[in-house]
């Protein structure tokens, strides 16, 4: 298994993930994970979660390209992409990742604004007089 590719999605974000056997290096948009997410430690843990569950943190390299949305959506898209790439790399990982919800695309997106409303559901203030 030389190169394994997978796509992860969340909100408006898409992550293209290439997984190769290696030493555990994670590169996102040409930057290391620490440089890309800075001090957002909780998001870094979410990205690394599939690798930790499958005990592949030190045995595979991740090279990813993310686009769309913000850091939160991109981090979750990356997590989804890594999970899918791991399953393509070794099908036995599916039994570990599926119960944890890593294989499911989180379909929650922002609801559109409706006509006559201030936001998606917020109505204008009612005035009796």
Image (spheres, rainbow, N blue to C red):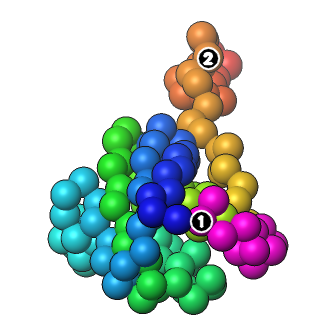
- Left or right for 45, reference 122: left
**Which sits earlier in the primary sequence, circle 1 or circle 2?**
1
Task: Name the spot of residue 99 as percent of width and height, x first.
Answer: 81, 73
Please indicate whether residue 97 sits to the left or right of residue 110 in the image: right
Query: What is the secondary structure assignment of the residue under circle 1?
Result: helix
Which residue occupies the foreground of this view, 119 or 108? 108
Quarter holding residue 84:
bottom right
Q: Position of residue 68 (x, y in %)?
A: 37, 39
Q: Is residue 91 magenta?
A: yes
| Number of marks in picture | 2
Question: Between marks 1 and 2, how big is the CA–CA gap?
Answer: 44 Å
Report helix, strand or loop for mark 2: loop
* Mark 2 nearby-residue class (10 Å; few <14, some 14–19, many ≥20): few
Span highlighted in magenta in the image? 88-99
| In magenta segment, residue 57 | no
Query: Which residue is under mark 1?
Result: 89
Residue at 58 percent across and 24 percent down: it is 112
x, y percent for residue 92? 75, 74
Where is residue 42 shown, x and y percent of the image? 43, 78
In the rendered view, would you say 58 is above or below 32? below
In the image, residue 80 above or below residue 55: above
Q: Nearer the viewer, mark 1 or mark 2?
A: 1
At a point 35% along the width and 56% down the height, the residue shown is: 64
Q: Which residue lies under the disc numbered 2?
A: 114
């Amino acid at each position: 298994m030389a190169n394994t590719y997978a796509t992860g999605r969340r909100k408006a974000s898409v992550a293209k993930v290439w997984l190769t056997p290696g030493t555990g290096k994670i590169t996102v948009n040409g930057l290391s994970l620490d440089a890309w997410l800075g001090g957002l430690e909780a998001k870094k843990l979410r990205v690394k979660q599939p690798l930790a569950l499958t005990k592949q943190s030190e045995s595979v390299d991740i090279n990813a390209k993310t686009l769309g949305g913000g850091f939160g959506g991109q981090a979750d898209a990356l997590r989804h992409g890594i999970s899918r790439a791991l399953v393509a790399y070794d099908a036995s990982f599916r039994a570990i990742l599926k119960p944890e919800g890593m294989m499911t695309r989180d379909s929650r997106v922002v609801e559109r604004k409706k006509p006559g409303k201030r936001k998606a559901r917020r109505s204008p203030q009612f005035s009796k007089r």
